[in-house]
Amino acid sequence: MREIPVPLKLQIPEDYPSLINCLIELIEEEKITSLTIIAGTYARESLAKQIHQDLSKVVSDLQYIEDIESITNTYDWLLAIGGGKFLDKAKVTAKNNEAHLIAIPTLISHDGICSPVAVINGKSTGAVMPEALIVPLFIIEKNELPMIQAGIGDLVANLSAIEDWKLAKVRKSEKIDDFAIMLSRRAAMNVLQHLEADLKAKSDPKEIIYTKNFLKSLIESLALCGIAMSISGNSRPCSGAEHMLSHAIDEIYGPGTKASHGIQVMIATVYLEELRGYDLLDNLYNASSVNLERSSFDSRLKKILIQLGLPTSFEEINITSEELKEIMILAPKTRPERYTFLDCLK
Ligand SMILES: [Zn+2]
């Protein structure tokens, strides 16, 4: 048996009054008397100020600090509202100040919303797991399509990451964690099965994506990724060779220059699937990823992504075959200690 950090709460309030109710409930349950509110640039003006005003009636020591960099010490609890990069900074601030973190993500473009890992200046670093995750659906519903597509992309990457872990077990006797794999697989499949079923009835992806049910399942899946990583104690269940390709792209061209993180890892997953030579979705429940029959196949994953109007080749994000060669050389060096399918290509 083992003890794993898992947030106390996962709530997806549909409107502002429900968000405040969630927070008040948490404050009462955890007997929170001192709380620091911090917010990223976009959340600062309206949401953070409103929350500050409404919580002032229930928390005796409440402060709102505009600039996260200026924090020297926080109260016992830290409430952070913002996008991925901001929440990453907040996780590290909470760790440095030994504070409990309440995370209110305003974007769902990657799987870091509920993980104990933060990416600061391109490097992964250990941070705190949020004590509570409260995702305001009324804000997520206004996220631009590319942001949500990036979140879907980061989930798709789990399928490649799981294959790499299975491979490392066979080739390098690396210990794998069945529960971390199960959660990572469930996270990806919740969303892909939802999309696969809905695409049969609706041809406009926006009609599927911008529904409460789909967005809730996407949020839950991204949270599941965090729990999977918390179980394994590292990013292994959700990050393999496809993430290395994306890190290499970021190193060569700068993050966000070619595409978002989620789109890059998604395209890399499709690209690697073809190199692996078997259908990732068909191999989901196969315990191994070696000695499989390699042949040409119609990728179910690629079909879903194309129907969604998402890019599935590097060419579509302006990466030429010459550039791809350079990326493939650099990729394994971005995380040399992690054995992946890329090591089989050397
Ligand atoms: Zn990722």
Image (tube, rainbow, N blue to C red):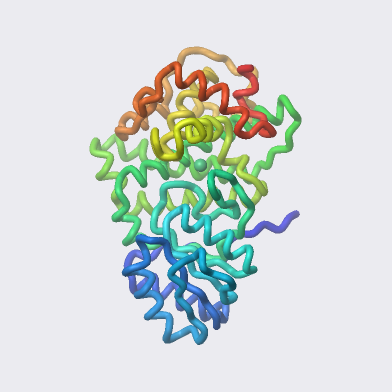
Q: Residue at x 64, y 23 (%)?
A: 343
Q: Residue at x 68, y 42 (%)?
A: 177
Which residue is at the front of the view, 101 or 158? 101
Image quadrant holding the N terminus, namely bottom right
The quadrant where residue 2 appears: bottom right
Query: Eyeballing the image, is 78 above or below 106?
Result: below
Whole-percent x, y for residue 137 in the image: 35, 60
Whole-percent x, y for residue 35 in the image: 52, 77
Whole-percent x, y for residue 315 in the image: 37, 22
Query: Eyeballing the image, is 90 above or below 32?
Result: above
Residue placed furthest toward the front: 70
Image quadrant holding the C terminus, namely top right
Which residue is at the front of the view, 178 or 119? 119
Left or right of 165 on screen, residue 139: left
Whole-percent x, y for residue 245 in the image: 52, 30
Left or right of 266 on screen, residue 182: right
Total number of numbered discs in the rendering? 0
Which residue is at the front of the view, 298 or 223? 223
Q: Is residue 89 visible?
A: yes
Query: Eyeballing the image, is 267 above or below 274?
Result: below
Q: Residue at x 55, y 43 (%)?
A: 184
Residue placed furthest toward the top: 295
The quadrant where residue 292 appears: top right
Which residue is at the front of the view, 64 or 274? 64
Q: Is residue 9 visible?
A: no
